[in-house]
């Protein structure tokens, strides 16, 4: 007690402690840590939505996030409410949020009903995999956090960035390369067909998805990849880590018959992005699309 | 007449060593159930210690007008229905396990063997993966009941199929039923594999979570339905105790003792299918309770079904209550799948019990 730490620092430590406690201790009670808060307490589900909270400087209102909220790093220290389709009513209410912002496929429905009847404001954002999804996320967080003005300003800035990115991609495009999205976060690899976040990203970045015959994700097979004939492979950093690096990734037998594999030493035909960046549809979308586009056409 | 007395004598001898311990074990299990109910009522992510409960109950009973407080809401609409569902589900699964092990005279039997779980799983898979394409109008009319009704129907249908496959010469052959059960379960597994191939990422995750079981969807309407079915199952199941004791001596002996084996078989299968079907449709698949509970009771109280049947129901309720309390609190505010806990805790404990008893009860 001889060297009193600054009040802000103490509060930070307290908040971090509470966050850790509520993750690790059974029946953790969180209410003790929070000072009287005039602005509503928020729980966000989905990495993109959590990023909007930080972009609006509303992180002090954030009392919980889900397991996909990995960016910015501070978001990893908040209490984790689990997977978006398997939320726990009591677990969420224990964080005493005034609002929960989640993708519209969050659930189970019974839990959503229980939250509504407990007076929690629910903001559900449909996953349309386009720019309106980002706009809806910004608007939803603005409403829920009582920062509508800041949300409008952020929206205007983002809309401008987005228009610019789209223009640059359009002007820059020559022939759209055939791209294949591969995800291998565990041993076996899946590839993306139509109507997925990955498909939308490839299209927005000025590429063509090499797989057109099915919707959703499917296991990767050698013959189908040979038939798809991608010029470039797009994958996530997490897939590369799980496979053991770039060299090991190219060893996958399914890729050996593709143009991308044949040209791998003369051109950089493997594009690697962070999974949340690539598939999260958050406020970083304009930069990510431009970055992806540059990598795709460089091949 | 002479044979009959000789066999009743034999049956009495078979019961004698542990008969005195039966009632004691039942009382102990009932006490354990009451204690675990009280303990689980005070557990949860939302800080609501046991000491607040009397106040909450008094508040609810006084029925003052006005909005319920959030503590009241959490306890009466989220936690309490879960506790009640845990008791009903555990009792139904434990009883069904004891019935099946008694009927098949096989210690490996569990309620899943007659296809009720795999049928429910297959129907749930069809609903989750193909529901939007095949019957898009149902959810609008039935909401989340679509999945419950489909799973219940699927469980009953597959059980009926297995029962029909085991018919020969105008009677049910139990050995045939066991093998048909194994085969049809494998077929349902293949169907689930095909469905998970067709599923999108979200559907796959939904299906996986369903297969691991959870009491998180407990709401009063569903809970009361499961309670009603479980109560009927208990009433009907407990009456089979003496018949199952006789059956332990073999079908021929049981028939000579006046047991109508065919009727017993039909009733036990029907009770199991209804009870486990109702539970599984509401909670997803909760493994190991039906297998473990009867074995534990038999180690404590001996093989007499008059104690094994009610004991398994009581112990099943205790096990599900405790497992769900852990599922709710270990990673709060997130929740672990219930099936993970029942397997993680149930299996090592079960193996230890078997080793210490050197498989005597088998």
Image (spheres, coloured by chain):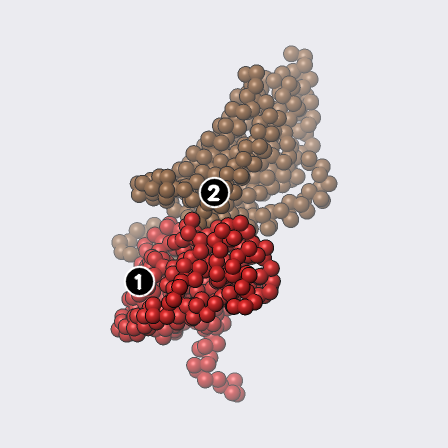
Chain colours: A red, B brown
- Say whether residue B204 is visible: yes
Q: CA distance from mark 1 to mark 2?
A: 32 Å
Q: Position of residue B191 (x, y in %)?
A: 50, 38
Q: Which residue is mark 1?
A: A132
- Residue sticking out furthest to the right: B358
Residue at point 37%, 50% (across, down): A109
On screen, residue A271 above or below B113 = below
Q: Nearer the viewer, residue A229 or A282?
A: A229
Task: Name the side, left or right, on which A242 lies relative to A295.
Answer: right
Q: Chain of mark 2?
A: B
On screen, residue B182 above or below A63 = above
- Say whether residue B229 is visible: no
Q: Which residue is mark 2?
A: B195
Neighbours of disc 2 within 10 Å: few (<14), some (14-19), many (20+) = many
Q: Chain of mark 1?
A: A
Q: Which mark is residue A162?
A: none
Count all numbered tags in the image, as a single digit. 2
Residue at point 33%, 42% (across, down): B136
- Residue sticking out furthest to the top: B1
């Amino acid at each position: 007690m001889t060297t009193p730490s600054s009040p802000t620092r103490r509060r930070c430590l307290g908040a971090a402690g509470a966050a850790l406690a509520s993750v690790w201790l059974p029946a953790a009670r969180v209410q003790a840590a929070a000072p009287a808060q005039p602005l509503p307490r928020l729980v966000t589900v989905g990495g993109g939505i959590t990023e909007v909270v930080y972009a609006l400087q509303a992180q002090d209102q954030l009392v919980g996030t889900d397991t996909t909220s990995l960016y910015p790093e501070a978001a990893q220290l908040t209490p984790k409410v689990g997977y978006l389709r398997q939320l726990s009513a009591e677990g969420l209410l224990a964080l005493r949020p005034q609002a929960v912002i989640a993708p519209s496929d969050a659930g189970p429905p019974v839990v959503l009903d229980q939250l509504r009847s407990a007076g929690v404001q629910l903001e559900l954002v449909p996953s349309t995999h386009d720019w309106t999804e980002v706009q809806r996320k910004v608007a939803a967080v603005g409403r829920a956090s009582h920062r509508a003005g800041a949300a409008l300003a952020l929206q205007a800035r983002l809309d401008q960035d987005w228009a610019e990115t789209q223009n640059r991609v359009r002007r820059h495009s020559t022939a759209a390369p055939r791209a294949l999205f591969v995800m291998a976060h565990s041993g076996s690899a899946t590839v993306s067909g139509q109507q997925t976040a990955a498909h939308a990203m490839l299209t927005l970045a000025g590429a063509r998805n090499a797989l057109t015959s099915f919707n959703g994700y499917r296991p990767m097979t050698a013959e189908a990849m040979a038939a798809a004939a991608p010029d470039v492979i797009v994958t996530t950093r997490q897939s590369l880590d799980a496979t053991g690096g770039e060299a090991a990734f190219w060893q996958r037998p399914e890729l050996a018959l593709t143009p991308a594999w044949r040209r791998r030493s003369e051109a950089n035909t493997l594009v690697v992005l962070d999974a949340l960046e690539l598939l999260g549809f958050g406020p970083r979308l304009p930069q990510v699309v431009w970055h992806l586009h540059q990598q795709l056409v460089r091949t | 007449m002479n044979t009959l007395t000789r066999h009743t004598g034999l049956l009495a001898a078979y019961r004698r060593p542990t008969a005195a311990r039966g009632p004691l074990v039942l009382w102990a299990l009932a006490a354990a159930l009451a204690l675990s109910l009280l303990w689980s009522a005070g557990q949860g992510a939302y800080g609501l210690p046991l000491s607040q409960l009397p106040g909450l109950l008094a508040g609810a009973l006084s029925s003052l007008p006005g909005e319920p407080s959030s503590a009241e809401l959490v306890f009466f609409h989220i936690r309490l229905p879960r506790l009640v569902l845990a008791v009903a589900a555990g009792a139904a699964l434990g009883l069904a396990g004891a019935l099946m092990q008694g009927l098949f005279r096989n210690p490996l039997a569990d309620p899943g063997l007659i296809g009720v779980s795999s049928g429910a799983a297959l129907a749930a898979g069809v609903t989750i993966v193909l529901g939007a394409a095949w019957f898009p109008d149902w959810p609008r009319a039935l909401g989340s009941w679509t999945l419950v009704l489909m799973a219940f129907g699927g469980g009953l249908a597959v059980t009926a199929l297995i029962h029909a496959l085991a018919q020969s010469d105008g009677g049910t052959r139990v050995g045939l039923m066991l093998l048909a059960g194994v085969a049809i379960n494998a077929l349902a597994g293949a169907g689930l594999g095909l469905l998970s191939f067709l599923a999108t990422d979200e559907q796959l995750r939904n299906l996986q979570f369903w297969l691991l079981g959870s009491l998180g969807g407990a709401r009063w309407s569903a809970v009361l339905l499961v309670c009603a079915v479980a109560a009927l199952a208990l009433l009907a199941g407990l009456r089979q105790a003496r018949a199952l004791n006789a059956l332990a001596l073999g079908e021929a002996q049981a028939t000579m003792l006046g047991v109508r084996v065919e009727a017993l078989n039909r009733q036990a299968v029907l009770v199991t299918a209804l009870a486990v079907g109702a539970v599984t449709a509401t909670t997803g698949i909760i493994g190991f309770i039906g297998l473990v509970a009867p074995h534990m009771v038999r180690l404590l109280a001996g093989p007499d079904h008059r104690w094994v049947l009610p004991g398994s129901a009581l112990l099943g309720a205790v096990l599900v209550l405790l497992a769900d309390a852990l599922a709710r609190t270990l990673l709060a505010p997130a929740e672990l799948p219930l099936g993970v806990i029942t397997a993680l805790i149930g299996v090592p404990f079960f193996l230890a019990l078997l080793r210490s008893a050197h498989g005597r009860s088998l």
